Image (cartoon, coloured by chain):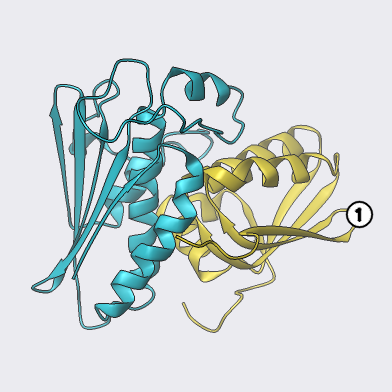
Chain colours: A cyan, B yellow
Amino acid sequence: VVLLRTVAPTMASLAPVRREVAETLRRAGVSSPTLDELLVVQGELLANAIEASAGDEAIEASAGDEAIEASATDVTGSGAPEEGSAAPVEVTVLVRDGYVEIAVRGRASGVIPPVSAWRSPEASAPRGRGLFIVGALSDEVEVRQDGRVSVVVARRRLGDGG
Amino acid sequence: VSDSGPRLTVHQDGPYHLRIVGEVDVSTAGMLRRRVASLGHGTVRLDMADVSFVDSSGLRVLLGAHNELAASGGRLELFRPSRALRRLLELTALDGHLHLVGGHADGTG
């Protein structure tokens, strides 16, 4: 089973994509709680990619911990993203041979720390839990950065209960 | 892609009691944060039994509210956390830091 979606880099994309991913996983026989955990993995990766790909305008709008209201008006359909402008984000879900693979591709924003460094922050730390959660809920995570593009792939084996 | 209905609803069940229903992600976390902050200081209870989805942005809001209330002599109580919320709280060890009350929202775990 495969789902491939290209979405505008706005946080409004999160919920509709989540519904589609849930439906895809359900059709493939994945059930709760594994399904819920995979939705969290997918959501964290997509939110990170949207934040990196939303463009300067949206990043400024997100200052002050407000929900990000990204403008999708200048999204281009293809080609390398321009510096500072919004770029589309691609989500792929693959279910086969007893595992689920979720890949999110977006604009590279700085350097993503190595997977081995995705530790749990101190209990009182306000930020920095997203990647830790992805790592904890996945069997394998792969980060590929190629110039301006970054792809994060999370794999999860499906057990008897999944 | 259709998207039916509001994804996060906050019901005010009392002066310091909110019932959170739906999905908390980056697009709805700001609303949750504002509603909790609008209650002012005191012992705030959030009924989390019907939170069907929550991510790290939701945890950030809960932790922020917890810290702010604690600093002013108040307290944040997470009432009947849903399975989805409980899973993330356990994973991040925040279940030992935040105040969980009222047991589980369901019979599992």
Q: Quadrant of residue A36?
A: bottom left
Residue at the image position 29 percent from the left and 77 percent from the top: A30
Q: Does B104 sit left or right of A108 as displayed?
A: right
Residue A123 visible at all: yes
| Residue type pointed to by label 1 | Pro
Q: Looking at the picture, how far across and down is residue A69, in whole percent? A: 56, 33
Q: Is residue A69 left or right of residue B87?
A: right
Indicate the position of residue A119 as horizontal and vertical percent values: 31, 39
Q: Nearer the viewer, residue A142 or A88?
A: A88
Q: Which residue is mark 1?
A: B15
Give residue A22's position: percent from left, percent from top.
37, 68
Left or right: residue A115 compared with residue B86? left
Instruction: Using the image as rendered, state which of residue B72 and residue B8 is in the foreground.
Output: B8
Where residue B82 appears, x then y in whole percent?
A: 57, 69
Q: Residues within 10 Å of mark 1 (few under 14, many from 20)?
A: few
* Residue B99 drawn above or below residue A75: below
Outermost residue toward the top? A83
Residue A162 visible in the current orientation: no
